[in-house]
Image (cartoon, rainbow, N blue to C red):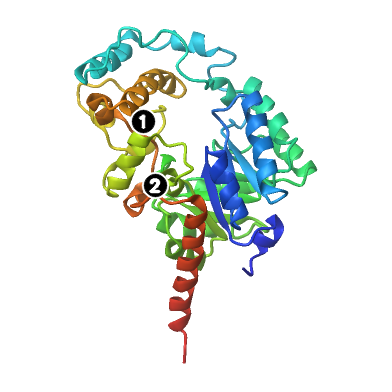
């Protein structure tokens, strides 16, 4: 493809795949796209293992990493550990979750005891973020993307020293300007259709707004994100001026994905109307599959979701139990089971390999460009 960004990154096709699955990263990169590993849930040791595995699989082909690092690498919680943070969760919120599980036949008596997953909120604070950066920057990555505000200046400087491009998630015109002023190389303009943390502005509106906002800044590339699951959508966004597409949801129903079988089955059956934008998972608005969990938090009797990271600390124990029980066929757990996904879920109707998704994107993109070009024929 005749693309300045492709030339800079050394890729064939500007399809960026955000994923928590190393297999998807490697498959997309090897197919000519650009895999990006979402690493916020990893420890430094596990990140080292994942990136070493990817390095061996891609054999020098480019890939990147995505983290959630606050601009100042600090937050209101300061140096509080997760255990101390959990103490701040009101009993009323705990009771609401316990009663919700009980109504679906799930024993909640030991819900708050023991370790329920390997994640730590330290990764969104200086103590954990720098450890992950140290690991990532010792590998031959080509892109670092921050999904939580303007990337810290110190991290940007370290990236530049290593020839690593820096990107940032952008949900509104004002975000774009702040990122551009900070010197970010790539803006991931994510519309409200996107899965996970998202804003309210639709992708079709956001892309031209962001491009207009940074018109006076040079050498900044905009990637379109939010609801994109086909090559024709990618072509439409690039026709508006985007340099490529940043995708996430479409990889969740691939054979390599980390998605649980229960959730994957629900995604393959879901329509685009069966996602919700809610604060019930992390404390910030995220789009995920509609389920008995999101329905319960939307009722008038539900408590107001807690701010990040407290809501995440509240929701992770029940979802750890929900996922395990759902895998065993528990009907109540299946009703509650959900995962982050965008409105593109309605276009994700068959499980296929990540490589075949890339090939479908390329073919669909080429056909869309041909159709558009035909309208200009004499």
Question: Image quadrant of residue 374?
Answer: bottom left
Q: Position of residue 355 (x, y in %)?
A: 52, 54
Residue at 23% x, 27% y is 331
Q: Position of residue 288 (x, y in %)?
A: 35, 38
Question: Would residue 257 be visible to someone looking at this image?
Answer: yes
Q: Residue furthest front?
A: 328
Q: Mark 2 highlights which residue?
A: 192
Query: Label 2: how many residues lie within 10 Å, few (<14), some (14-19) or many (20+)?
Result: many
Residue 105 placement, left or right of 313: left
| Label 1 residue SS | loop
Residue 270 placement, left or right of 240: left
Q: Mark 1 highlights which residue?
A: 279
**Above or below for 308 versus 165:** above
Q: Position of residue 71 (x, y in %)?
A: 61, 32
Q: Earlier in the sequence, mark 2 or mark 1?
A: 2
| Label 2 residue SS | loop
**Above or below for 191 versus 14:** above
Question: Image quadrant of residue 339?
Answer: top left
Question: Would residue 169 be visible to someone looking at this image?
Answer: no
Closer to the camera in the image, 166 or 12:
12
Q: Position of residue 297 (x, y in %)?
A: 27, 26
Closer to the camera in the image, 83 or 202:
83
Query: Label 1: how many residues lie within 10 Å, few (<14), some (14-19) or many (20+)?
Result: many
């Amino acid at each position: 493809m005749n693309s300045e960004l492709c030339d800079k990154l050394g890729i064939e096709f500007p399809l960026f795949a955000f994923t928590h699955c190393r297999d998807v990263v490697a498959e997309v990169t090897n197919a000519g796209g650009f895999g990006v590993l979402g690493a916020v849930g990893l420890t430094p040791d596990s990140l080292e293992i994942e990136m070493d595995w990817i390095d061996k699989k891609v054999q020098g082909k480019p890939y990147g990493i995505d983290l959630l690092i606050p601009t100042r690498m600090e937050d209101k919680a300061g140096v509080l550990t997760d255990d101390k943070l959990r103490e701040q969760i009101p009993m009323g919120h705990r009771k609401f979750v316990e009663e919700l599980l009980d109504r679906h036949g799930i024993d909640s008596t030991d819900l708050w005891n023991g370790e329920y997953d390997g994640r730590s909120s330290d990764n969104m604070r200086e103590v954990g973020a720098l450890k992950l950066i140290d690991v990532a920057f010792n590998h031959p990555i080509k892109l670092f993307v921050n999904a939580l505000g303007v990337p810290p200046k110190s991290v940007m400087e370290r990236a530049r020293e290593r020839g690593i491009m820096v990107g940032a998630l952008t949900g509104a015109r004002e975000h774009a300007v702040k990122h551009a002023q900070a010197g970010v190389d790539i803006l991931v303009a994510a519309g409200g259709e996107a899965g996970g943390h998202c804003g309210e502005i639709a992708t079709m509106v956001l892309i031209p707004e962001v491009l207009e906002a940074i018109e006076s800044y040079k050498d900044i590339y905009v990637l379109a994100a939010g609801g994109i699951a086909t090559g024709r959508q990618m072509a439409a966004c690039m026709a508006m001026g985007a340099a490529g597409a940043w995708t996430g949801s479409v990889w969740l129903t691939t054979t390599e994905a980390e998605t649980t079988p229960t959730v994957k089955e629900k995604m393959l059956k879901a329509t685009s109307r069966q996602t919700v934008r809610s604060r019930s998972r992390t404390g910030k608005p995220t789009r995920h599959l509609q389920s008995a969990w999101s329905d319960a938090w939307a009722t008038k009797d539900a408590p107001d979701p807690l701010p990040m990271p407290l809501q995440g600390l509240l929701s992770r124990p029940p979802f750890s139990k929900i996922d395990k029980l759902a895998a065993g066929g528990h009907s109540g757990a299946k009703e509650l089971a959900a995962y982050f996904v965008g409105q593109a879920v309605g276009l994700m109707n068959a499980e296929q390999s990540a490589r075949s998704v890339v090939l479908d994107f390329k073919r669909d993109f080429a056909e869309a460009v041909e159709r558009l070009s035909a309208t200009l024929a004499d």
